[in-house]
Image (tube, grey):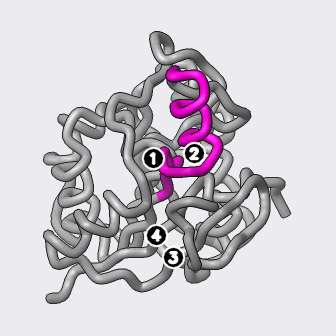
């Protein structure tokens, strides 16, 4: 078994064995490798950073260099069982359009993101009047790739507005799961499994 970041471990635990998937913003391919090796999945990836693409290829993974904001349009409808976007939604130019593409390409979609409504983020803004730097948001505002800060409540509102079905949701505080109660305040990260009604 591969050691995975907590949100990736949640995704891996809930992907059906033998599934096909597209991991968008796959980084160095850690999740894809785990799903290929441990669950026999047909894992493909898209990654913007050429160094990470090279790491994926070195692991024998099928990855192309691409930009989620532009290149998802070239993937056919319902071409994989799962489209995965882990900790990348907030870095895209149009998160709503990327989410729409994920649900077009995959029969289901996993999305994970950092929750900017977490109490430490709120406290930093309130107490210091500055954008937070935390273990999970480790760089100052001028270096961060995050361009659309969102909270769990923001994401829930978008799903409701677009008529997207939530099949599963998990909330993480640090490296452990926490309950849905007050998740917008308590959770540092969220993981959602989504689908669209046919």
Q: As rendered, which of 1 and 57 lies closer to the eye?
A: 1
The circle drawn on residue 45 is 1
Dot in front, 2 or 4: 4
**CA separation, marks 1 and 4?**
19 Å
Residue plotted at (58% across, 28% down) = 132
**CA separation, marks 2 and 1?**
8 Å
* Quarter location, residue 106: bottom left
Image quarter of the C terminus: bottom left
The circle drawn on residue 88 is none
Drawn side of residue 104 relative to residue 188, left or right: left
Q: Which of the marked residues, 1 or 4, is nearer the chain's N terminus?
A: 1
* Furthest residue toward front: 127
Report if the CB atoms under discs 3 and 4 are less than 8 Å apart: yes
Mark 2, residue position:
61
Residue plotted at (64% across, 42% down) = 120
Q: As rendered, which of 90 and 105 lies closer to the eye?
A: 90
- In the displayed structure, would residue 136 be above or below residue 103? above
């Amino acid at each position: 078994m591969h050691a995975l970041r907590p949100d990736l471990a949640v995704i891996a635990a809930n992907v059906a064995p033998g599934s096909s998937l597209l991991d968008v913003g796959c980084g160095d391919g850690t999740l894809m490798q785990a799903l290929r090796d441990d669950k026999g999945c047909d894992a493909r990836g898209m990654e913007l950073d050429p160094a990470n693409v090279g790491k994926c290829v070195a692991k024998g993974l099928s990855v192309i260099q691409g930009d989620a904001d532009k290149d998802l349009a070239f993937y056919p409808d319902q071409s994989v069982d799962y489209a995965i976007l882990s900790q990348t939604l907030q870095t895209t130019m149009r998160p709503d359009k990327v989410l729409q593409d994920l649900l077009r390409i995959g029969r289901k979609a996993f999305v994970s993101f950092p929750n900017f409504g977490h109490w430490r983020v709120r406290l930093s803004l309130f107490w210091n009047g500055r954008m937070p730097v935390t273990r999970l948001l480790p760089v100052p505002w001028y270096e961060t790739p995050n361009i659309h800060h969102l909270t769990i409540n923001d994401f829930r509102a978008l799903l409701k507005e677009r008529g997207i079905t939530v099949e599963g949701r998990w909330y993480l505080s640090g490296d452990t799961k926490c309950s849905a109660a007050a998740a917008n305040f308590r959770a540092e990260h969220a993981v959602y499994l989504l689908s669209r009604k046919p």
